[in-house]
Image: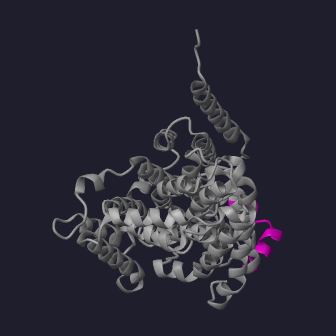
């Protein structure tokens, strides 16, 4: 009689590895770490293992980490629970509810069909459309996962329409266009990626540095403008298509049929678009009114669901994924507790050797170093949120030890953690695309390596030009 199946082995093996890692880290760390610092670092390492291997849901893992921090008493309970009270958490909640409300209308579908009808009949235009649709959505839908999830069904339909066979360059190009388009879509819009929101929150919490929605856009827009065509060109070059596979006249007809099914633009879509524009205007005007971005997001939720004014019923909008809420809240609590335990300061002291300090004091060299460091760290800690909340406080502390302004180093670190192209676990768009079964991890390796190099080079280029010109570096 079979006693254990492969799922059982994965679960027990993952937990055994996490426990062993916890013990190894706790007893392996030097005495320079306090008891709380050792325990907190061990909890983070074991938590990362469980998040990476995913023997249980991400939310349940987050709850286990929360309980571990409380039971081991690594910090006061008010610190451990502080992530749940953070404005960043409410920004994520508001963003998820907004995305649900928008999806209750035909606005995003209509926009997608119009773009694909106009440019999707040629392979280059098709890829560009898939990438650009997600960039446009970034202003209105504050979640990379939701944006990619919205474009995936359309992309699957395109694959069926074009007859792209399994393993073909066309299928790989389309699916990686969804994944990589989703990854870079969070670059310039602060509310468009969880990593951005966490970076802003941590800089404010530990360095007293406030970055507004407009400032984030102002700093990163040139990088975004570089990455969009660069990723588009990369996928075209890596996945060349014969001429007979470059034209798809059926797509135009397919999109026309979809638009006909939707009918003319209705009042709900107009109201939805007007509310979204109002929210974006409030985000951009943050320097004038001083409201945290979470407040416009919540205002948007209210407007979207009010009778007569709104576009969606309250019940479906409030049914958000609580796994994500637990993940973000606990991740923030991990960052706060990691600093409160003294672990971040201890690690920063080990990094604060003279040669490293001399390099960090050069702003441009500092950007290059933290960009590379963030990419390596992100490969080891696949979860973007965890990578940000662990690495950004350390970099802030190192910068403060070096006596330099931590703004650019902390900002560049959080931004670089966003760009995960090689491994499917590095980003939610990658995971969602891989979950379709239309593409494998192997398909990510070569284009992912080049995309990583491009993102690093582009960040350094922008730092040495634009950031220098505006006084950030």
x then y, percent, for residue 314? 23, 57
Of residues 276 and 471, the one drawn nearer to the viewer in this rendering: 276
On the image, the x and y values in percent for residue 94 come to 35, 62
Q: In this view, does 222 lie above or below 231?
A: below
In-front residue for pair 435/331: 435
The picture quadrant where one finds residue 257 is bottom left
Indicate yes or no whether the magenta region holds residue 360. yes
Q: Please identify the quadrant where the C terminus is shown.
A: bottom right
User: Seen in the image, is 261 located left or right of residue 451?
Assistant: left
Left or right side of 106 for 449: right
Q: Please say whether residue 128 is one of the residues in the magenta stretch.
A: no
Quadrant of the rendering where the N terminus is positioned: top right
Q: Which of 425 and 177 is in front in this view?
A: 177
Q: Is 293 placed left or right of 220 in the picture?
A: left
Residue sitting at 36 percent across and 79 percent down?
282
Question: Residue 442: image x %, image y %?
Answer: 72, 48
Observer-nearest residue: 16 or 145?
A: 145
The furthest residue to the bottom: 469
* Residue numbers of the magenta segment: 348-363
């Amino acid at each position: 009689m079979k006693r254990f199946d492969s799922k059982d082995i994965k679960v027990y093996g993952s937990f055994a590895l996490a426990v062993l890692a916890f013990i190894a880290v706790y007893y392996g760390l030097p005495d320079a770490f306090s008891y709380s610092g050792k325990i907190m670092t061990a909890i983070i390492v074991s938590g990362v293992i469980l998040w990476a291997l995913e023997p249980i849901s991400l939310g349940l893992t987050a709850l286990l980490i929360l309980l571990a921090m409380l039971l081991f008493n690594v910090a006061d309970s008010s610190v451990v629970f502080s992530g749940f009270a953070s404005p960043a958490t409410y920004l994520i909640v508001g963003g998820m509810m907004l995305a649900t409300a928008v999806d209750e209308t035909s606005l995003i579908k209509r926009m997608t069909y119009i773009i694909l009808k106009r440019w999707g009949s040629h392979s280059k235009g098709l890829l560009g459309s898939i990438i650009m649709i997600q960039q446009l959505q970034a202003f209105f839908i504050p979640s990379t996962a939701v944006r990619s999830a919205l474009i995936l069904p359309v992309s699957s339909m395109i694959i069926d329409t074009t007859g792209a066979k399994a393993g073909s360059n066309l299928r790989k190009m389309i699916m990686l266009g969804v994944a990589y388009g989703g990854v870079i879509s969070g670059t310039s819009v602060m509310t468009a990626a969880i990593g951005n929101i966490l970076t802003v929150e941590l800089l404010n919490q530990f360095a007293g540095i406030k970055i507004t929605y407009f400032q984030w856009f102002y700093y990163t827009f040139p990088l975004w403008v570089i990455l969009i065509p660069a990723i588009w060109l990369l996928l075209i070059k890596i996945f060349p298509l014969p001429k007979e596979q470059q034209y798809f006249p059926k797509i135009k007809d397919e999109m026309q049929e979809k638009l006909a099914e939707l009918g003319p633009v209705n009042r709900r879509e107009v109201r939805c678009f007007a509310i979204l524009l109002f929210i974006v205007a409030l985000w951009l005007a943050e320097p004038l009114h001083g409201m945290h971005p979470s407040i416009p997001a919540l205002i948007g939720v209210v407007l979207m669901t009010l009778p007569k004014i709104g576009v969606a019923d309250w019940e479906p909008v409030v049914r958000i994924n609580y796994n994500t809420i637990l993940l973000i809240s606990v991740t923030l609590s991990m960052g706060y507790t990691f600093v409160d335990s003294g672990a971040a300061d201890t690690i920063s002291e080990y990094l604060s050797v003279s040669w490293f300090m001399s390099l960090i004091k050069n702003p441009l060299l500092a950007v290059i170093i933290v960009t590379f460091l963030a990419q390596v760290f992100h490969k080891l800690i696949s979860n973007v949120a965890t990578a940000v909340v662990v690495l950004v406080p350390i970099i802030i502390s190192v910068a403060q030890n070096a006596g330099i302004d931590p703004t650019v180093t902390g900002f560049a670190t959080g931004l670089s953690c966003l760009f995960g192209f090689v491994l499917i676990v590095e980003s939610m768009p990658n995971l969602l695309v891989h979950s379709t079964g239309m593409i494998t991890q192997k398909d990510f390796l070569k284009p992912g390596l080049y995309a990583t190099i491009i993102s690093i080079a582009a960040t350094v280029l922008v730092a040495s030009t634009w950031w220098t010109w505006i006084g950030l570096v």
